Image: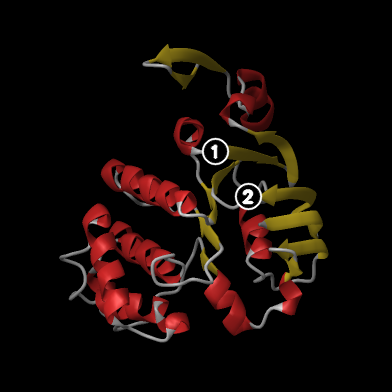
Amino acid sequence: MLALNGFVQAERVGPVSGEFAAGSLTLLIGPNGSGKSSLLTGAAGLSRSEGKGEVRLAGKALSGFSLHELARHRAMLAQQAVLPHGLRGYELLALGAEPLGGVSEAVCESIARLAGPLGLEKLYQRQLNTLSGGEQQRLLIASTLLQVDPAINSDAQLLLLDEPLAGLDWQHQLACLRLLRGYAEQGLAVVASIHDINMACQYADSIWCLHRGQLAACGGPEVISPELIAEVFEVRVKVMEQDGQRIMLPQE
């Protein structure tokens, strides 16, 4: 679906080569400054600085898409999104529907489906500047998901999110990951960066571990080992088994 070939952002990330497959949830892990945000921004075609290498979506170079085409084929949640001042929650989601032709009955149905898992019902009528950081984040996630909801956007292919779980309580972190899995199961290539390694191992089909701008490991959750954690994060962990799940616990 999305293929990177020798992708480089100077002094940030690369060269990185690999593919984010359709129907798969890929989670990026790595320390702060390891290149996760730069990789996601490049994968979205939003890099401000000139990069090297090639990024192709469904076989077509990202440079060959217009901004309008990109907005229909992929959605990106940035780590530090700028919220329009004075808008209410439902107006932010309406902006997410703009590439789809605006708010329609089908869009309203999609908004209703997202409201329950993300706890949005009480947020739609409130002004964004009155909301907590976590409440704002949940609306931003919903707006991003709406843009590429397969139920209303037949062109949707790629969903990218930079630290979507930041600021969320545990309940909504889990709800968000379940939604991402659901979008992947509907055929999208879904890629997100997160910091919780155990959650990454539980929910991801594939994990990319970045270290100093390089791809240190790539594959299923089994590629995340205590040795890799010690090398990349400089933390010693022990592995425990609980109900068939591997859990990594930091050691003193």
Compared to residue 23, the image places residue 208 above or below, namely above
Left or right, 183 with respect to 56, comes to left
Residue at x-position 53% and y-position 57%: 188
Distance between mark 1 and mark 2 Cα atoms = 10 Å
x and y percentages locating residue 69 in the rendered image: 60, 80
Residue at x-position 51% and y-position 55%: 187
Residue type, numbered disc 2: Ala
Residue 59 figure quarter = bottom right
x and y percentages locating residue 15 in the rendered image: 82, 51
Question: In the structure shown, which secondary structural element does the residue marked by tag 1 occupy?
Answer: loop
Query: Badge 1, how many Cα within 10 Å: few under 14, some, many 20+?
Result: some
Left or right, 116 with respect to 238, comes to left
Question: In the structure shown, which secondary structural element does the residue marked by tag 2 occupy?
Answer: loop
* Tags 1 and 2 touching, CB below 8 Å: yes
Query: Is residue 165 visible in this depiction of the protein?
Result: no
Residue at x-position 74% and y-position 69%: 60
Q: In the rendered image, which residue does mark 1 sit on?
A: 205
x and y percentages locating residue 34 in the rendered image: 67, 46
Q: Quadrant of the N terminus?
A: bottom right
Residue type, numbered disc 1: Asp
Q: In the rendered image, which residue does mark 2 sit on?
A: 21
Query: Badge 2, how many Cα within 10 Å: few under 14, some, many 20+?
Result: many
Closer to us: 129 or 58 = 58
x and y percentages locating residue 37 in the rendered image: 61, 56
Compared to residue 73, the image places residue 207 above or below, namely above
